[in-house]
Amino acid sequence: MHRLLKEQLQQLSDLSRNENLDQEKLEILVQILLGERKWDKPCSFSLAETVWRIYSIAAGIQLTAEEFRSHSQLLKSPCSTILSDVYENHSKQIRACLSTIRIRNPEVLDVRWKEQLNSNAAASVAFELQTLPVDTLATGLVRFECDRNQLLELHHRLKEAQNFLEILNSNCK
């Protein structure tokens, strides 16, 4: 399970012990999240923020209604069913809303590199990443240069990221 989603579901479980969370409140919170309604204090702000985070995370990682339902069952609370029902009814709208605030990074299309010799005879490598920004079809370029030590550090960080993704993907299955 996504760590942030799990944390927020636990926080919601804690908050909902002190405050009643029903379908009407959830519908109002979604309307506020989507900008269709102004904040009129349907519940505590901390409860509202937690619900918004849960729905935003779930929509951002493209959880289906069934996947969301299985995650929310961990709440072991009556509100997990209504939380799932409201997500199922509004997940497409939430995703559409999130896409307007650019929650994704550009996609890397190509990586090129070439050796560089500086005036002090120190060797380095110049990289050029060709990217496709989310909100346009025009490609962008990201350029940077690394000496041997920086390249080793970059390699180490990329390897850490790869290992993290492999762990995350195996936990999500």
Image (spheres, rainbow, N blue to C red):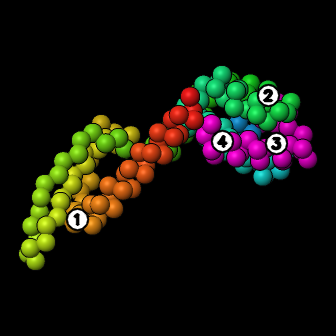
- The tag on residue 148 is 1
Residue furthest to the bottom in view is: 120
- Name the residue rendered at 70%, 26% in the picture: 69
Tell me the mark number nearer the camera, choosing from 4 and 1: 1
Q: Which quarter shows the N terminus?
A: top right
State which quadrant residue 10 falls in: top right
Q: Secondary structure at mark 4?
A: helix
Distance of label 2 from label 1 (alpha carbons): 55 Å
Q: Looking at the picture, tell me which residue is in the foreground, 60 or 120.
A: 120
Amino acid carrying label 1: it is: Arg
Callout in the foreground (3, 2): 3
**Amino acid, disc 4:** Leu
Q: Quadrant of the C terminus?
A: top right
Circles 2 and 1, Cβ within 8 Å, touching? The answer is: no
Q: Residue at x 78, y 52 (%)?
A: 46
Look at discs 1 and 3 and give the one toward the viewer. Answer: 1
Relative horizontal placement of residue 11, taking residue 145 as reference (left or right): right
Using the rendered image of the protein, determine whether residue 86 is visible from the camera's viewpoint.
no
Residue count near mark 1 (Cα–Cα under 10 Å), binned few <14, some 14–19, many ≥20 = few
Vertical placement of residue 121 versus 27, above or below = below
Q: Which mark is residue 5?
A: 4
Secondary structure, mark 3, is helix
Question: Which span of residues is magenta-colored?
Answer: 1-28
Q: Nearer the viewer, mark 4 or mark 2?
A: 4
The picture places residue 3, in percent across and down from the top left corner, at 63, 44
Closest to the camera, between mark 2 and mark 1, is 1
Callout 3 touching callout 4 (CB < 8 Å): no
In the rendering, which numbered label is found on residue 82? 2
The residue wearing badge 3 is 13
Whether residue 16 is in magenta: the answer is yes
- Secondary structure beneath dot 2 equals helix
